[in-house]
């Protein structure tokens, strides 16, 4: 059975002390509970990685970053490399989040470069894709996702695909309170799995974890996760409240 994942994306929230305190309480919560059916990941800002890594050691929570540089090292002021992320103990990195695509103009080619670099550094990549509202209204959502995956991800060799988690995050659902219906999520996830199958074969497609993100909360998580192709969630706002995040992680 393929891996289920619930990942919290803190985005640019919490200072160092607040973040470490929060990570401590999430870590503690999961240590005291039987292991949830889903792997739990915290994707924190860079400055929290090292501290959170120490907190979660030998526990049940995993760690990821939210971005990485497109170059391995050198004169790139302000950037953080995949190697640096890996050296904190983090195992994951989010690449291609819609906020990176739109606010920082990260295009498919750049995201492809980052993805290859992260994988070659030994990081697992949560690769995000998603259409904006107009694209869905015009009925172009499938074609947009196809392009994002073909150009950003499908240049990877087959053996690298086990390092990939795909996250479908419709941009119109992120932080808006508007969630994709379970049927809309299932339709897209099924489509994405089909694309993976066409490119990499049935086994790879069956094993690919595909997460849903966009206003996922305790009240809708169980229904979304009950769909056969929805393997968990990438959680923004609700990952900043321990009770909500825990409830989503336990929604399976
Ligand atoms: P919200 O859960 O706040 O809608 O954010 C989703 C998201 O962007 C996770 O990466």
Image (spheres, rainbow, N blue to C red):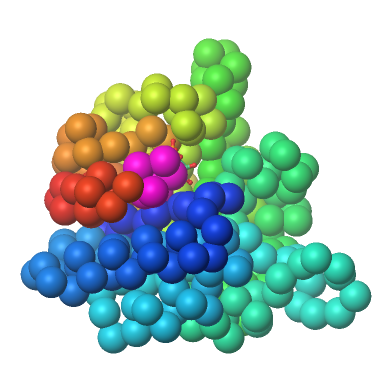
**101 inside magenta stretch:** no
Q: Nearer the viewer, residue 22 or 191?
A: 22
Q: Nearer the viewer, residue 45 or 115?
A: 45
Identity of the residue drawn at 62% across and 60% down: 67
Q: Is residue 183 left or right of residue 240?
A: left
**238 inside magenta stretch:** yes
Quadrant of ligand 1 in image: top left
Q: Is residue 237 left or right of residue 103?
A: left
Residue 74 seen in the figure: yes
Identity of the residue drawn at 46% across and 60% down: 18
Identity of the residue drawn at 58% across and 50% down: 12
Q: Is residue 181 left or right of residue 10?
A: left
In percent of width and height, residue 6 lies at: 31, 55
**Quarter of the image where one finds residue 23:** bottom left
Identity of the residue drawn at 60% across and 17% down: 134
The magenta segment is 234-240
In percent of width and height, residue 145 lies at: 55, 38
Q: Nearer the viewer, residue 63 or 97?
A: 63
Residue 193 seen in the figure: no
In percent of width and height, residue 35 lies at: 14, 70
Q: Residue furthest left?
A: 34
Q: Residue furthest front?
A: 17
- Image height of 191 relative to 180, above or below: below
Q: Residue furthest right?
A: 75
- Image height of 8 relative to 217, above or below: below
- Image height of 132 relative to 45, above or below: above
């Amino acid at each position: 059975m393929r891996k289920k994942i619930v990942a919290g994306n803190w985005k640019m929230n919490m200072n160092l002390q607040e973040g470490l305190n929060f990570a401590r309480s999430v870590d503690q919560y999961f240590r005291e509970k039987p292991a949830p059916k889903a792997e739990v990941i915290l994707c924190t800002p860079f400055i929290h990685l090292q501290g959170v890594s120490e907190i979660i050691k030998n526990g049940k929570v995993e760690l990821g970053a939210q971005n990485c540089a497109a170059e391995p090292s050198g004169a790139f002021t302000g950037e953080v490399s995949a190697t640096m992320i890996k050296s904190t103990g983090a195992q994951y990195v989010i690449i291609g989040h819609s906020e990176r695509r739109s606010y920082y103009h990260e295009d498919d080619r750049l995201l492809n470069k980052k993805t290859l670099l992260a994988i070659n550094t030994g990081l697992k990549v949560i690769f995000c894709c998603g259409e904006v509202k107009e694209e869905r209204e015009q009925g172009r959502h499938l074609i947009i996702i196809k392009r994002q995956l073909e150009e950003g991800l499908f240049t990877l060799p087959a053996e690298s695909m086990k390092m990939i988690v795909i996250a479908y995050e419709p941009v119109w659902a992120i932080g808006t309170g508007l969630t994709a219906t379970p049927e809309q999520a299932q339709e897209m996830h099924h489509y994405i799995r089909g694309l993976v199958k066409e490119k990499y074969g049935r086994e790879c497609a069956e094993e690919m974890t595909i997460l849903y993100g966009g206003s996922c909360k305790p009240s809708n998580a169980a229904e979304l996760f009950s769909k056969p192709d929805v393997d968990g969630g990438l959680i923004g706002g609700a990952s900043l409240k321990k009770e909500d995040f825990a409830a989503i992680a336990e929604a399976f």
